[in-house]
Image: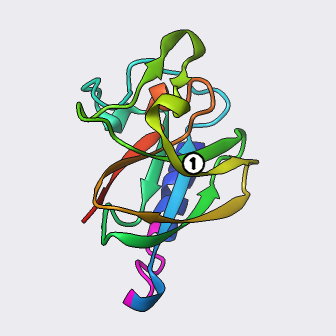
Amino acid sequence: MKLARNILAAAIFAGAAIASPAFAGTTLHVFLWDAGADMDMLDNHKIGDGADHATDTMGVTANVTTVPAGEITFDVLNASTDSEHEMVVSKLGPDGTLPYVADMARVDEEAAGSAGEVSELAPGDSGALTVTLEPGTYALYCNIAGHYASGMWTILTVK
């Protein structure tokens, strides 16, 4: 039931305005979700693992996945009713993945190079981040231990 409610909220949230006028930069609406307190944590749903995103127990959803280079504002909502989440922006490495430290169950942000983040958000809270991004492929992900490997990421293409 919680997952269905979170998916419905994501659909409503994703239907919000896609972008601001060109002179003001681009605004993305980002939705952080999970399947609730009783969900199974996964360890094989990282970028490049080949896992089916449809079976993720956590996720990051953005209302658009391709944006023009330049100033980008991320409006982030933690739609979870149980868990704290964050959103980190990192450019993907040449192999299309992020450096992962298995014994810490998280991405090595220093090695990945964070372009910015919306720090930990309590359930229902929101935050914003404005950064200037060059063309490339980026990941938006939650780096709280175990969340990224449970599928809590999405890809953003900046052209």
Indicate how the structure is coloured in the image: rainbow
- Of residues 53 and 105, the one nearer the viewer is 105
| Residue at x-position 63% and y-position 32% | 144
Q: Is residue 99 above or below residue 13?
A: above
- Magenta stretch encompasses residue 18: yes
Q: Is residue 128 magenta?
A: no
Locate residue 109, reporting x and y percent.
Answer: 53, 33
Q: Is the residue 156 above or below the residue 37 in the image?
A: below
* Quadrant location, the N terminus: top right
Which residue lies at the image location 54% right of the left edge and 46% below the top edge?
A: 88
Q: Is residue 17 above or below residue 30?
A: below
Can residue 126 be seen in the rendering of this structure? Answer: yes
Q: Which residues are magenta?
A: 14-22
Between 90 and 12, the one nearer to me in the picture: 90
Q: Position of residue 112 (x, y in %)?
A: 45, 34
Residue 129 image position (x, y, % from top left):
60, 63
Q: Secondary structure at mark 1?
A: strand
| Residue positioned 57% across, 53% down in the render | 5
Q: Quadrant of residue 125?
A: bottom right
In the image, residue 159 above or below residue 15: above
Residue at left offset 23%, top offset 30%: 95
Which residue of the protein is positioned furthest toward the top in this rendering? 103
How many dots with numbers? 1
- Amino acid at pointer 1: Met
**Residue under label 1:** 87
Instruction: Identify the image quadrant of the C terminus.
Output: bottom left
- Give the prevailing secondary structure in the magenta stretch: loop
Q: Position of residue 135 (x, y in %)?
A: 28, 60
Q: Is residue 1 visible?
A: no
**Crowding near pointer 1: few (<14 within 10 Å), some, many (20+)?**
many
Q: Quadrant of residue 85?
A: top right
